[in-house]
């Protein structure tokens, strides 16, 4: 794994945007795997800024998001579809942008459809990932075994608690999600893992111990041939 440690969150977001921009220059019709959460917000703002300045263009590029709550409607303000529209898709020009359908009647069929769509697009060129406090990737939570396919998962207490900050009091927070499995993530040609903030220092340390701890899903990334980890100093302070 290649590790870039930047001074602060802003610099980490710029470094991640540079990786997006370089790939867009090399291959304008790239397929991007995207993530939600707090970590990529600075990156998305930087991509919007560069797009508005005419420096990058997504018109030939496509995107697939890692995950979506289940069940949830696309218009729910806490849905990842809404998050992506607000923070990126309404501001740049991807030729198509997909997420697993949190409103699908048949989640198993939706998962199979989503994997087939990624496959038909030729797989993912660059997969952006954040990391959960418990080491989850997408919503692949720590478990004894991991699904290769997109699948419906039960979120752990740790994840529900970490993400409860986005839900207003009285709002029902879904306890399940549809998430890409390790198949599509591992088939990505390049992986960009962003780890920022002091609260991620402990999990970052476990990742960089150099062992594939199977109870830390992110450790499986140690087996991928092309992973760049972009961090800020706060997240890297225990390394
Ligand atoms: C989101 C996702 C999650 C987040 C992780 C970190 O699409 O797949 O794995 O990347 O929960 O979330 P933040 O960035 O909010 O700390």
Image (spheres, rainbow, N blue to C red):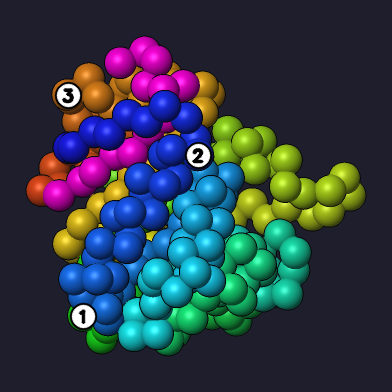
| Magenta stretch in the rendered image | 226-239
Residue 111 seen in this snapshot: no
- State the residue lying farthest toward the front: 53
User: Residue 148: x and y, percent?
Assistant: 27, 60
Residue 116, quarter of the rendered image:
bottom left
Label 1 Cα neighbours within 10 Å, binned few <14 / some 14-19 / many ≥20: few
User: Residue 135: x and y, percent?
Assistant: 40, 35
Residue at numbered disc 3: 210
Q: Is residue 237 magenta?
A: yes
- Compared across the picture, whether 111 is left or right of 78 comes to left
Residue at numbered disc 1: 122
Tell me what residue is drawn at x 37 percent, y 21 percent.
Answer: 236
Dot 3: what SS? loop
Tell me what residue is drawn at x 58 percent, y 45 percent.
Answer: 38
- Compared across the picture, whether 148 is left or right of 177 comes to left
Tell me what residue is drawn at x 53 percent, y 71 percent.
Answer: 52
Pick whichever, 11 or 147, lies toward us.
11
Dot 1: what SS? loop
Dot 2: what SS? helix
Residue at numbered disc 2: 10
Point out the image quarter for the C terminus: top left
Tell how many labels.
3
Residue 25, quarter of the rendered image:
bottom left
Pick whichever, 55 or 139, lies toward us.
55
Mark 1 beta carbon near ligand 1 (under 8 Å): no
């Amino acid at each position: 794994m290649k590790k870039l440690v930047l001074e602060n969150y802003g610099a980490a977001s710029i470094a991640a945007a540079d990786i997006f921009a370089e790939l867009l220059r090399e291959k304008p019709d790239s397929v991007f795997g995207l993530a939600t959460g707090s970590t990529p917000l600075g990156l998305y703002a930087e991509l919007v800024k560069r797009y508005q300045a005419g420096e990058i263009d997504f018109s030939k590029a496509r995107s697939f998001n890692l995950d979506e709550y289940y069940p949830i409607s696309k218009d729910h303000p806490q849905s990842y579809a809404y998050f992506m529209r607000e923070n990126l898709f309404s501001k740049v020009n991807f030729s198509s942008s997909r997420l697993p359908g949190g409103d699908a009647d048949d989640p198993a069929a939706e998962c199979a459809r989503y994997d087939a769509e990624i496959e038909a697009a030729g797989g993912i060129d660059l997969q952006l990932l954040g990391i959960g406090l418990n080491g989850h990737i997408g919503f692949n939570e720590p478990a004894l075994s991991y699904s290769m396919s997109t699948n419906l998962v039960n979120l752990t207490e740790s994840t529900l608690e970490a993400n409860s900050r986005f839900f207003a009091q009285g709002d029902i927070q879904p306890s399940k999600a549809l998430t890409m499995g390790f198949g599509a993530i591992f088939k990505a040609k390049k992986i960009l893992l962003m780890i920022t903030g002091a609260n991620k220092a402990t999990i970052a340390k476990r990742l960089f111990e150099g062992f594939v701890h199977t109870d830390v899903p992110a450790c499986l990334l140690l087996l991928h041939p092309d992973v760049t980890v972009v961090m800020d100093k706060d997240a890297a302070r225990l390394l």
